[in-house]
Amino acid sequence: MKKSTIIIISLMVIIISLFYFKQESNLVPENLEIPIKKPAAPITEIKKETEIKKEEIVITPIATTTEKTKITEIDLNVPFSSQAPFSDWSEPYQNACEETAAMMVAKYYQKATLTPAIAKQEILDLVAWENKTFGYYEDTTSEETAKILRDYYSFKRVDVIYDFSLDDLKAQILAGRPVIIPASGQMLKNPNFKAPGPIYHMLVIKGLTKTGDFITNDNGTRNGHNYIYKPDILYAAIHDAPQGGHSINKADLDANRKAMIIVYPN
């Protein structure tokens, strides 16, 4: 081979080698920067941020108002019995109004049944207990009747309230408590009483109507269940017995103070 040919081939190899080297150099940028991933925030910092956000939340409560309902009428489910359960008005039933009034309220709180047979026997038992305790059973005072409720029926709280107003009386009934009241019987003007009516009487007030009348269980008559009394008549008739025993003078009774007996459930 000629010397000139060898030189030309060598030059071509050098040129081709330089060309490829340049191409490979262009594949990598001169200022290559590899991004560095920032480390995640520590768990304590995340928790702190969360707590800050929670503190920023303000919960405003919605104000609500409920209007208190005022009760103006009530009728308590007090069981009824006449003081003469089988229409026998001989003694002791003729003078058993206090015993029957106490019995009705006791049965109300006991949620017990009251039939004529039960009422008759219980009146006889009460009369025997009173004769032993007081020496008599007729015309017991409010305090003596309260003693029957405390000692015979075992109610822990029985209040006798004196010299009260008509509104005080209504308030007790509207509070859900039946009220036993002593009365000058003839002042009640109940047409069901045998004329002229009993001198001394005791009955249960168990409700109020919308118009303010009293709903009673008046045990002095077989027609006494839910008997309605006008408030002025009933309130005026309320008088406590000056003393127990069958010797009450009407004038003394009518001049004596008002009383009401309030029984509380055990």
Image: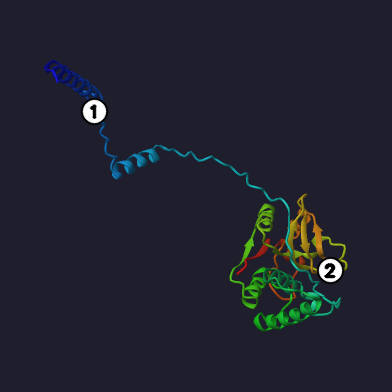
**Residue displayed at 26% across by 31% down:** 35
Residue 113: give x, y in percent of width and height: 75, 74
The numbered dot on residue 182 is none
Q: Distance of mark 1 from mark 2, alpha carbons? A: 113 Å
Residue 220: give x, y in percent of width and height: 81, 69
Q: Please, what secondary structure does the residue beneath circle 2 have?
A: loop
Q: In which quarter of the image is the N terminus?
A: top left
Given residues 109 and 50, the one toward you in this image is 50
Figure coloring: rainbow
Given residues 197 and 234, the one toward you in this image is 234
Disc 1 crowd rating (10 Å Cα; few below 14, some 14-19, many 20+) is few
User: Residue 183's quadrant in the figure?
Assistant: bottom right
Residue 227: give x, y in percent of width and height: 81, 61
Q: Would you name the residue on which mark 1 appears?
A: 33
Residue 233: give x, y in percent of width and height: 78, 56
Amino acid at pointer 2: Thr
**Residue displayed at 19% across by 19% down:** 12
Q: Would you name the residue on which mark 2 appears?
A: 221
- The nearer-to-camera label among 1 and 2 is 1
